[in-house]
Amino acid sequence: MSYRTIKRLLGETSLERKCRFLFGSGLLTLITGSFYFYARQTTELVYSQNRVTAQLLVAPVILEKHWEWSERGQEFGFAGRVSEMATELKPNDLKEYSWAMIGVDVDDKSTSPFFDLEEHRVFREIEHGKREVVRILRNKKQHEYQYFGAVYASESCLGCHQQRIPKDRPPLKAGDLIGMVKISFPMEKTQRDLAWNNAILLATAIVTAFLAMLAAYAIVRYVIVKPVLHLKEVSDNIARGALDQRADIRTGDEFEELSHAFNRMLRHLVTVQEELQALNHGYEKQNDELAQVNLRLYELNNLKNEFLATMSHELRTPLNSILGFSDVLDGSQNLTDKQKRYVNHIQTSGKNLLSLINDVLDLAKIESGKMERHPVEFSIKDLIERMVGAMLPLAERKNLDLGWDVDPRIPVLWQDNGKLQQILNNLLSNAIKFTPDGGRVRVYVELRDPATFAIIVEDTGVGIPLEEQERIFEKFRQGKTLPGKRDALTREYEGTGLGLSIVRELAKLLGGDVHLVSEFGKGSIFTVTLPVRLDVNLESPSTVRNRQELTAPVATAAVM
């Protein structure tokens, strides 16, 4: 029987029950087998003893038969006295046996006593060489042990038995079969004795098994299970917070060693817990300080955003005046070439400053969560065609190949047209700016799935190194275009470094994201993935980020 079979048989039960069941089953099987074997051996010994007794009686039976024949040959009146004396001389324990002499002529009833067909078959077996045959009769009428033994002629038998053999048969020789002896023992008393012996054996087996089970119960209960239960009780108390509990097992065996190891582990656990509590108190204090600092930073960040938004708004008013008056001056007819050149410088610098102010204002609105979305239905093909047409003069100045392609499967979008136009403007401006003369810029629009589309801007510009590709989306950052210049703020081209940061923030605001694939010196591919229909109930990413930054230290302190 395998372990899995035993597990299925016992199920999820206690160790004590398993030990008692297994030990008791094995002990019961052992006792039953041993007592059954002993009973079988006893029965075989009784039958073997009957056989030996029958063998010892063969010679007295033959002698008694000869005495009968001798008395019948005398003329005196003592017939039967020798037989009677032989019967009286039998041992007391053998008075119940009976015998019969069966001659060779078994078919001649004048010379052989009458016997049944089974005895006739037994005699035929003896004639074929068997020296003895044992038969046990068990029926309602009788229960006997029958022994059939062969009788062979000796030298002293030849003179008498030769006269009884008919003349037509060959003469008798020493060693020839002259008959058989049938000895019968009644088995009733023997069976009663065997039954009583078996009853004693069964009672002894039951008592032995009961006592063995009691011993097994005591061994399992007090030697095995009790230490285990003590360890379990201590473990439960420790789990409930009673760390001062200790295992106390004094058995002088492996259980005592286990209790010592358990106590050592518990002491180490208490020490580690005390160290962790000390560290935890320090971390809680630091987290409280960090929470206060973070709250202060959050407030300062809001003040900064409000300041930038206010200043950007206030700066645009006088700047628009400057740009307006510069346009008026540019239209004057009495300006010299030098004065016109100065006016152009004013216009260029004013437009750059206005662009910078607009970027800062947009970024401040996005970070403060005040940037609103205004979704409308429009065709992305019309938007791409209009944006590429607006950028075409800049591309022609650098002799760039500017082209576009829109997937015809794209449906009418429900998106914020203005912010999508701002994303395209920043990506196309960067692509044209960082692509050398004679390069190529392409704009593709693909349908990724029924609910998502992608805007891809690909150029053959200077590319972005791998280590700079994630930092390129940070504020006031531009990628390095020349090797050996390690300052991230060093710019080989004009710009504020806010364009890509605004692109990423606007893409997230519209429910999408932007990805970059670039190889330094071979160009870049910007992919903006957006939903076809904008969910106006979608929470602003900047709002989510601000809430997480505000609550993160508090949550960390709670965990610690």
Image: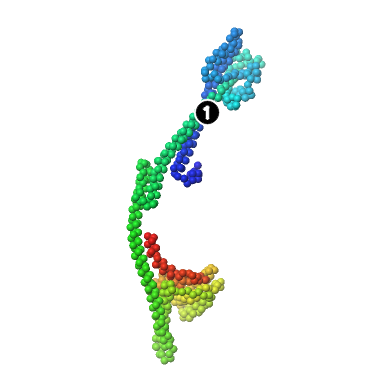
Q: Kindly identify the residue that appears in the image at 58 percent across and 17 percent down.
A: 153
Identify residue for label 1.
195
Q: Nearer the viewer, residue 196 or 318?
A: 196
Query: Which image quadrant for residue 117?
Result: top right
Rendered location of residue 456, percent (x, y): 49, 72
Residue 363 x, y percent position in the rendering:
42, 74
Q: Is residue 182 visible?
A: yes
Task: Return the residue nearer the eye: 473 or 509.
Answer: 509
**Front-lying residue, 532 or 402:** 532
Q: Nearer the viewer, residue 387 or 412?
A: 412
Q: Quadrant of residue 552?
A: bottom left
> What is the x, y in percent for residue 399?
47, 79
- Does residue 427 sit above or below 227 in this rendering? below
Q: Secondary structure at mark 1?
A: helix
Q: Residues within 10 Å of mark 1 (few under 14, many from 20)?
A: some
Specify the farthest residue to the top: 76
Type of the residue with mark 1 = Ala
Looking at the image, residue 553 lies above or below residue 40: below
